Each structure stands twice: as C-alpha cells, then as structure tokens.
Amino acid sequence: MALHIVIDARRIRDFGIGTYIRSLVHALGDIDATNRYTVVSGPDDVRTLAGLPPNFQSAAYARRDSDPLYNLAFPLFLHQLRPDLVHIPLNRVPALMVRPYVVTIHDMASLLYPEGSQGSIRSQLHRYRFRRGLLRATRVIAVSDATKRDVENVLGVPSSRICRVYNAPDPGFCQRDFDSPEAHQRILERYQINYPFLLYAGNIRRHKNVPRLVEAFAVAREQLANHPVYKDLRLVLIGDTISQYPAVRHAVIKSRVEQMVRFLGFVPFETLRCFYESAAAFVFPSQYEGFGLPPLEAMACGAPVVTSNISSIPEVVGDAAILVNPLNVFDIARGIREALVDGNLRQELIRRGREQAARFSWDRTARQVLEIYRDAAGIR
C-alpha cells in the first residue's frame, strides 16, 4: 500500500534544521519510488527542492508561524492535502495538528536554556505546547540517545514511542577535492584571510558557550605568542549576527582580542566548506547539543576538532576529537593548544575524524525514517 506523506519543509533555509530537511527529503527521493510525497515550503523555497523524482510534489504555504491563526490555519492546509501521515521535522506542532504525525526532536535547548525566565508564563506555555506536541505524536524521532533520554526524563514521553535516528553531515562536506586550491584561495582572499585561524560555526545562543571560547582563544594565543606558525592565530566565528549577543562582544573586549576575532555571519555552503577545510582547528565548546552536527561537518572536511565532553557530543564524535570541559576556559585552551602543536595527534585526529563522519549517512537515516513512517501509518 502506497502512502501519501506530507513533510513540513518551511524551515529549509535554517542553519541546522534546513540541513536536516533538505538532506532527508533528497535521501528519501533516492530510495523511495513507491510512496507519494508532498513537501510543504514557503513560496520562495520551492526551487531549493528541485531535482526530486516524480512521486514528490511541492505545496506552497505563505503564512508565518507567528500568525495568530497558525494553530488553526496550518492544520486546515494540511487537511486539504489529504495525507496518510505528516512529518513535522522540528518541535513546532500546531495545537490542532492533524493525525497521525511524526515529529523530529533535534534538541531541548529551548526548555533547558530558555532565553527568558524559566518560570515565566510564556516559558510555561512553551513547555506545555512542546510536551503536548510530542505526546500526541504517533512517533517521535530523537536525533541521539542523549536527546531520547531527555525526552523521556524531562517530558515523560513513553520510550516505546521514541525512535533514535542519527543525523548525518551534508553529503557535500564528505566529497574530497570538491574545489580546486585556487577556488579556496579566492574565497579566503575575498574575506582577507591570510593567517592561521580557529573556526566556530553555528548559532550563538547562550548554551553554545561562545564567550568562553573567546576567552580560551585569548589564553591559547598568549601561550603560542612565540610559536613560528601560530603566533598570529585568529578566531573566525560563522553564524548569527553578533549584534544580538552582547555577552560575546563583551568577552572579546574583556580579553583584548578585538583585532584577532572575525564575525562573518552566515555564509554560503561552498564558503563554509572552504573555511572548514582551511581552519587550523574547529572548536565547538557547546554546553548542550541534541546531536552536534558542526563537529561532524568539520571532521568530514579534514579539520581537527576540539569539542565538549558532555551532552550528546561524545556519543557523536567518538574518539575522533579532543574532548574538553566546556565550563573550564583553561581546559578549552589546553585542547586548542594540543590540536595545533602536537603534530602526531593532529594527523590522527584528521584521520579518525574522516572515518567518524563517514559512519553517518543520509541513506541510512532515510531508510530508518521510512520504516518509522510505515510503522506510524500502521503498515507492517
């Protein structure tokens, strides 16, 4: 029996969620010619879904999640598509969501690290909606064992309804010799980068721990002041606009590294890949991750990785990274220094990193998700 599966792809341009949606949809297109898919996206996003097989079609939905009628309008829109199953690839489930549906939970940062007061009415309402959306789901896809445990322990969702399915790096990061050295050099020259640099890529929310990264960079730079290669070490941050995060700017000023830290905002895929491949090391001292995709992306591109020893990150990076205590600036600096100056360790990290990234694939992820679709729709 063929199913009609609707996938909510309205966040396809987002930094992390967008990678998940885009990679999963195309991987499903590669393996499933039986079921019929409708991919819901914004009117301007349809072109990002080009190249899918004939059993995939697009549907444009223009209203924003902030629309007061969102909880009614989006379910009505989905109902008109007459799906057998809906996949919501992030925990933003409308109150009147049509069933059956599957939700992917990427992390619980909005509950564990709320932007406002944890006891506020707004925070409590968010927690209620978060939990309700998962409890009503036929199946919940958690992207790591750590996230699965959080969903069980914090929200009380039955373990029998939660399936762990790992994410994977965008396949484009795993291609070797994708760009010529000349193309890389042109990108670096465009950003006026002609020095060794540490790289961070991702959002700059509170749990990402970027202020401590800046402080650790300042410590490591001072320790390497006389090093023949790394005496002019810089830090490049790719992600959110820094103006929204005064704590990071304050850390830069306090550490007196204003001239050594570059904030680049979001960059195109090819540019990000170039920065991964060119970085002296990728440093990701996050305090909490549902999966932690950037370290794997960096590993796929051959960058030595320094990252946290807590949350889901050790589960994902295995023995292919230097693990540090993200709450200890000097331990982060120690990891940076080892990744740079220990030549044998550095080469071993690069080798193990590529092997570790290759253990995760969107083909495997899509096949597991397809089995969950069948199970949720009652097909054995």
Image (tube, rainbow, N blue to C red):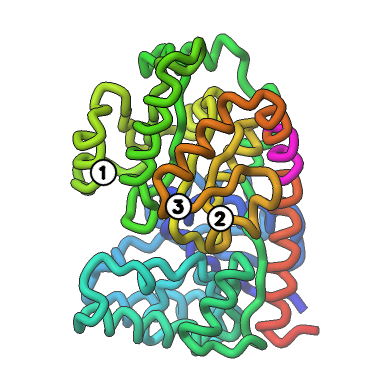
**Where is residue 46 drawn, in percent x and y?**
46, 50
Which residue occupies the foreground of this view, 90 or 44? 90
The residue indicated by pointer 1 is 248
Magenta residues, as a range? 350-356
Crowding at label 3, few (<14), some or many (≥20) Cα neighbours within 10 Å? many
The residue indicated by pointer 3 is 326
Crowding at label 1, few (<14), some or many (≥20) Cα neighbours within 10 Å? many
**Element class at badge 2:** loop
Residue at screen point 59% across, 86% down: 138
Q: Which tag, 3 or 2, sits closer to the chain's start? A: 2
34 is within the stretch colored magenta: no
Residue at screen point 56% across, 55% down: 309
Type of amino acid at the residue the image marks with label 3: Pro
Which secondary structure is most common in the magenta stretch? helix
Can you tell which quarter of the image residue 65 is in?
bottom left
Is label 2 or label 1 in front? 2
The residue indicated by pointer 2 is 309
